[in-house]
Image (cartoon, rainbow, N blue to C red):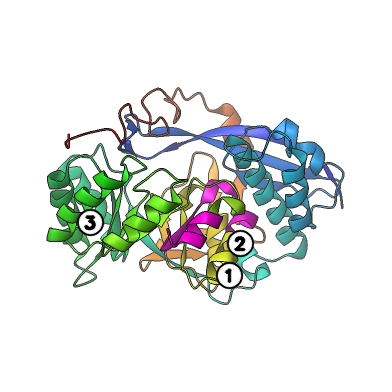
Amino acid sequence: MKITGYRCLSSVHNWGRPVGDVNGFVASGITEFPIVLLETDVGITGVGTGSHRDLDQIFPAIEGQDPRAVSALYDRMLAQVFKSGHGGATFGGIGTFDMALWDIKAKALGEPLWRLLGARDKFVPGYASGLDIALDDDALSSFYVGMAERGYTAGKLKGGRDHEDDIRRLTLVEDALSINARKPGLMLDANESWNLKQAERFMAKIEDELDLTWIEEPLRRWDAAGHARLSRSIRAAVATGENLTGLEQYSQLFDLGGIDIVQVGSVWGITHFLRVAHAAHSRNLPVSPVGLTLNSALAAAAASVPNHLTAEVQDVNAPFGVTIDQEFIDGGIVVGDTPGVGVSIDEEAIAAQATTHAGWLAPGGPHVRSERAGLRLVGE
């Protein structure tokens, strides 16, 4: 079997609500959904989702190769961009090809990915995450009530600008989820918007009122020393890692004790998740994938590692023209038995769509860092 080529498709995901964080939001609630179809000479096509970045630069590393050698091909892709580096957006292209490679391998064996990776149970524990910075209190409650009806017992709020607002809104999340748990798990995501002392002051106010499970991305992703100091000064766990593009970028966080919950961005692919999970396991740390809704393949990978804690569930609907073999029930995700990663694409429907949509990378969106982030004297 050999890889012969690839094709790119672009669909959209309609969240049905504004989505974003402290750095901005997409008011339309409609975001791009990049798809890559990796072709072989035996008619098996692998599906990868997440990014179209730098695919032409990366593809020579896997062209003509046997796609079943996934781990070796992953390292070939890293080596292909050695000089310029695999960090940042390039890593998304590598992760998307990586997902497609795993899809081909599992399809060739006639197995769902979770079984190929050695999982015993198809159930993956999860937590609700509304990407909810732009939701008013009623919409916020409504989202988490809906997730509570699916059995979720923990929720994550986007915040970080005003502790009084965040305490009020975290309490709304707690109330909505309390039908399933006496003390629901509560997490707060600041999306790298603080400096260390801001984080300590903000967290002191929060922890005066609430028992927070974790604070997510309180500081810039590379500030290992700052994360370590913060972890020692608060009760909540410090969760970070979703924006780290490569196993090597976790080294200082591990060595300095700056990470309590090891997070992995789903857009970076399956092999990256597995390697980070095993590195975390060697340090007795739990791992938690972020953004799982739009990369369901990572649920199968999460089911296979011994230290998976919980996975972020942002939405229960699939992007347009995409069918995903999974269920969001009982407070988690149940992955299906379809061979491969469980994602099928309706190319005709996607090609025929005539949807005008606002982009996830639009100015002011959540992937654009806010002005004065980490430089505010008072809350806003």
- Element class at badge 1: helix
Pick the front one: 242 or 128: 242
Label pair 3/2, CB-CB below 8 angstroms: no
- The amino acid type, in three-letter code, at marker 3 is Val
Whether residue 287 appears in this view of the structure is: yes
Image mark count: 3
Q: Residues within 10 Å of mark 1 (few under 14, many from 20)?
A: many
Q: Is residue 112 magenta?
A: no
| Residue located beneath label 1 in the image | 304
- Spatial CA distance of label 2 from label 1 is 9 Å
Q: Of circles 3 and 1, which is in front? A: 1
Q: Which mark is residue 274?
A: 2
Label pair 2/1, CB-CB below 8 angstroms: yes
Residue 328: image x %, image y %? 41, 60
| Residue located beneath label 3 in the image | 145
- Spatial CA distance of label 3 from label 1 is 30 Å
- The amino acid type, in three-letter code, at marker 1 is Ser
The residue lying at 32 percent from left, 63 percent from top is 232
Left or right side of 177 for 287: right
The answer to whether 52 is drawn above or below residue 132 in the figure is above
The answer to whether 165 is drawn above or below residue 117 in the figure is above
Residue 22: image x %, image y %? 30, 37
What is the magenta range? 251-274
Left or right side of 307 for 142: left
Residue 9: image x %, image y %? 62, 33
The image quadrant where one finds the C terminus is top left
Label pair 3/1, CB-CB below 8 angstroms: no
Upstream in sequence: badge 3 or badge 1: 3
Upstream in sequence: badge 3 or badge 2: 3
